[in-house]
Each structure stands twice: as structure tokens, then as C-alpha cells.
Image (tube, rainbow, N blue to C red):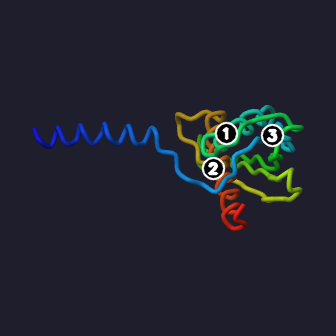
Amino acid sequence: MKTAIFLFVFLIFFGIVKGYYRPQHPFPEGKIYVPLFINKTFKEDIEEIITQKVVDELLLATGFRLTSEEEARFLLRGEIVKYVKEPVTNGEYKLTIGVRILFLDVEEKRTIYSGDISESLFSSASQTEKEMVERISQTIGRKILNLILKEFEKNGS
């Protein structure tokens, strides 16, 4: 019984703390503009999914707010440069998506990060290609966030 009560109290406390805890990060707060990623691949209609997942990851973990290009302090441009669907076994495949990003501090007129990022995922029997694109896009968003975070930490911005 004591174990059950302890577990209950622990879960409630953890839930409350987790809900209100926001980790400290070196990102300055500010407005960001993220135009639709440019799709340079043969695969149609993936730019909306990828852009949205990247934006979701950025807004979730930072103090950024989306705004127009004219009002933005930061600008994140992206191009989808790779979309490869390779068969692995009968009915299964590996999907790889690559993006090229440019993250700018518009006010200071400097490039914070520029580079290519790619991510792969192996299909499972229950996953659709669209679901795989969404999962890969979310992971790419996290990678972009981590790369930008490293640059802010390195430069003390």
C-alpha cells in the first residue's frame, strides 16, 4: 500500500513539474520567419509536411514566435534536396529525406547555421509513406534545432 501511495504521489509530482518546467536554453527570444521549404525533388506535396514539422519543433523548444519576413529577427530557409525510397526486402523499404537549411540573424546580418541534414527510416508493415515522411520530418526538425542550439552556445548569442 505504501508503495502504491508513493508511486501515486511521485507520478502526480512528476506530472506537475514536467508540465511547468521549461529548460533553459541560449536561444534569444524573438520573431522568426520560415517560408515554405522549396522542393527540389521528384516527390510532390512533401514541402508542407516537412516545413510544418520543422516549425513545430522550433516553436516547441524555443521562445520564437512566427511572424512575417518584414518583422522577423531570424529567418530559416530550407530546400528539400533528397527523397530516396529504396527497397530493402519484399514489401519493406528505406526512405531517406535530405534538406539544406540556412538560418540567419537578420538584425545582425549574419549566418548562424548553413548546411545539409538528412534522415532515414525503415518502413514497417503498418506505416504509410506519408507517416514516414512525418516522422522523418520531425526528426529533421529536432536535428535543425540541435544544430542551431550548438551555434548559439558556441557564439554566446
Q: Which residue is mark 2?
A: 142
Say if 15 sits above or below 96 in the image: above
**Circle 3 SS class:** strand
- Residue 125: percent from the left, percent from the top? 53, 37
- Observer-side mark, 1 or 2, equals 2
The part of the image, by quadrant, that contains residue 52 is top right
The residue under label 1 is 133
Residue 33: which disc? 3
Which quarter of the rendering shows the N terminus? top left
Q: Secondary structure at mark 2?
A: helix
**Element at label 1:** helix
Q: In the orientation shown, which residue stands out farthest toward the bottom?
A: 154
Q: Residue at x 35, y 42 (%)?
A: 14
The numbered mark, 3 or 1, whose residue comes first in the sequence reads 3
Quarter of the picture holding the C terminus: bottom right
Between 26 and 92, the residue placed more toward the observer is 26
Q: Is disc 3 surrounded by few (<14), some (14 to 19) or many (20+) residues within 10 Å?
A: many
Name the residue rendered at 32%, 40% in the picture: 13
The residue located at (59%, 40%) in the rendering is 91
Instruction: Out of 56 and 153, give the one closest to the viewer.
Output: 153
Residue 111 image position (x, y, % from top left): 84, 59
Instruction: Give amino acid for label 2.
Output: Arg
Question: Alpha carbon of mark 2 to alpha carbon of mark 3: how far?
Answer: 18 Å
Residue 127, quarter of picture: top right
Between circles 3 and 1, the one closer to the viewer is 3
Local packing at callout 1 (Cα closer than 10 Å; few below 14, some 14-19, many 20+) is many
Residue 48, horizontal then vertical, whole percent: 76, 33
